[in-house]
Amino acid sequence: MEDYRAAYEKEHIKTADLAERVAVLEAKNEELAFKLDRIRNNPLWKATAPLRRCMHFLLRQRDRLKNCGNLRGIMAKLKYKRIERKAMERYGTASFPDEETRKKERETVFAKRVKISILVPLFNTPENFLREMLDSVLNQTYENWELCLADGSDDGYKSVGEICLEYAKADGRGRIVYRKLAKNEGISGNTNECLKMATGEYAGLFDHDDILHPSALYEYMKAINERDADYIYCDETTFRSGNINQMLTMHFKPDYAVDNLRANNYICHFSVFDRKLLDGTELFRTRFDGSQDHDMILRLTDRAKKVVHVPKLLYYWRSHEGSVASGIDAKPYVVEAARGAVADHLRRHGFTHFQITSTRAFETIFKIRYQIVGNPKISIVIANRDHPEDLKRCITSIMEKSTYENYEIIVVENNSRMREIFDYYETLKAFPHVQVAVYESEGSFNYSAVNNFGAQRAQGDYILLLNNDTQVITVNWMEELLMYAQREDVGAVGGKLYYGNKTIQHAGVVLGLGAHRTAGHSHYGQHRENLGYMGRLCYAQNVSAVTGACLLVKKSLFEKAGGLDESFAISLNDVDFCLKLRRMGLLNVFTPFAELYHFESVSRGLDTEGEKARRYNEESARFREKWKEVLEKGDPYYNPNFSLDRSDFALKI
């Protein structure tokens, strides 16, 4: 029996591998076909030679601008850059506290006045970098700190020690502790030596060539006192030419999100943590040199009781030749170290037979493929009224493209009038895994009630809500959704949906986004090839909600959450449902690796005028009242520095 089970598991994994490979090839073919079709149908192709050259020029610019997709996309990106440059002005030295604020922060009396030991491993540090780093610590408005400097520099860099001792003497308060190491132990070994020198209750990790905002430690102390934080991080930026106002990339991060962190070390700088989190474990493990911080962050956030993100730009990461900030090519071993760190973390959480591969965004931004346990049945619930061509396209794509086979389709018929749709229902009787359930109702259409009716008839372990105006793109779309939905800590999982022109309709839902300040879709309207903000369109991540147009959830959780709230007849029922799952302590996940077309609003039209607009306004008001406290706190996965008026992660001006 054990041999049979092992053989089954082996074949199961092999099948998943093949499905993955097919999905990748299908995606490439889809994109090539789309590009070819666009060229053939473009009227410029038949125009004069100068016009064709103009078109080719625009296409080259498109590729240069990360494949925005068309002239409109190029202009949108240029506008985004203008907004970013304008917003950037207030995040550099302009954000530093004036004398009055400095005095107020220095004199603040905290109930917990912990000492923070800042750990800085030194190695052949250029004098100007070293002095700027030291000055940024000395300029902290919170003064109960300790700077631990372990110097592994070569003999030709004796000036490093001389400068450190100079600063220690000038400070005169014993806060700067310097030690020349007998030999260079690498970044992990040298940082571990820093920790041995530390006497503070908390420790912070600081690179020898970077700069801290003057209020960094003050803001962290507020998090420790007001929120009982035992692990803290902030937003950061890279800068060049020794001028922090010349920013290259500003990274405004989400609050703690474990799936984001597994795929991408988004936390990075400036990590400060309670040293109790290290009890019985090392700070940096030398076998993960190059990605030692990712390994450490994964381990310590696992142990932390309260991980707090300070949504302020407080860390300036210097970009120069040879630094990691200047590019992954500077340290190619980082990729393998990062993959190993994530694998070690996943094994600690009980996962086996997973795969970790680099994505098109960046070599250390990963796609994680979890093993699907068993062969659970998925019940696909599709609400439908008329629209025979849409429904046929949807169901045909499921049957012809899906590599996952254990599913049933439940079409919930609701007051159709067209003879063609009933003729199509007759053809579906030939498929035993498809049923048409008739939901009879009086009055206006209620999406929530129709789907709840369908879910009650589901025989599967999982319920997949799917709109009738969708079409499958990725052949292993169900596997990609299921690998997350099967986890005990996950509630709803949603895929990446496109309009017919391959611009994004859904890539995760952000609370408070849009004119109604209820919820909106991130990266809306971006082209399929766009990498997203900091690569976020390239990896699975935690979100507040996903669209009900393609939502997978355990049937038991669907029932425990009470299904869809039928008071939200048309709009926001999916967001409301996801928030109920979050309230149950579960994570919601968006994965870009389950792709479908969504010809949105073909079935019911847009909610922008007349009766539909009135109804949407009413449901929006009800949603804002029901989730008032949640909305006031803001979306934890969407940084408050971003505008709620745009879906492209543009900064507030």
Image (spheres, rainbow, N blue to C red):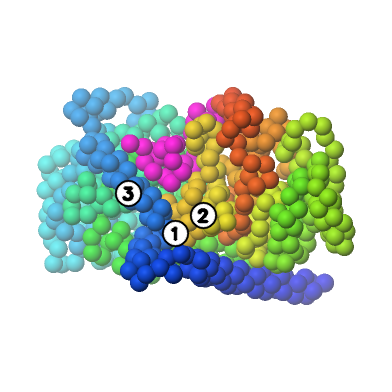
Q: Residue at x 55, y 61 (%)?
A: 368
* Residue 646 belongs to the span the image colors magenta: yes
The numbered dot on residue 397 is none
Q: Residue at x 71, y 59 (%)?
A: 393
Task: From the image, state whether disc 1 or disc 3 is nearer to you.
Answer: 1
- Name the N-terminal-most of marks 2 and 1: 1
- Name the N-terminal-most of marks 1 and 3: 1
Other-residue count near label 2 (Cα within 10 Å), few / some / many at <14 / 14–19 / ≥20: many
Where is residue 424 drawn, in percent x and y?
Answer: 82, 56
The amino acid at mark 2 is: Thr
Q: Which residue is mark 3?
A: 81
- Name the N-terminal-most of marks 2 and 3: 3
- The image quadrant that residue 33 belongs to is bottom right
Q: Is residue 621 shown left or right of residue 567?
A: left
* Residue 539 belongs to the span the image colors magenta: no
Mark 2 → mark 1, Cα distance in angstroms: 8 Å
Please provide the residue range marked out in magenta. Answer: 629-653
The amino acid at mark 1 is: Gly
In which quadrant is the N terminus drawn? bottom right
Where is residue 381 drawn, in percent x and y?
Answer: 76, 49
Mark 1 → mark 3, Cα distance in angstroms: 17 Å
Q: Which residue is mark 1?
A: 69
Where is residue 160 drawn, in percent x and y?
Answer: 15, 57
* Relative depth, front residue between 504 and 581: 504
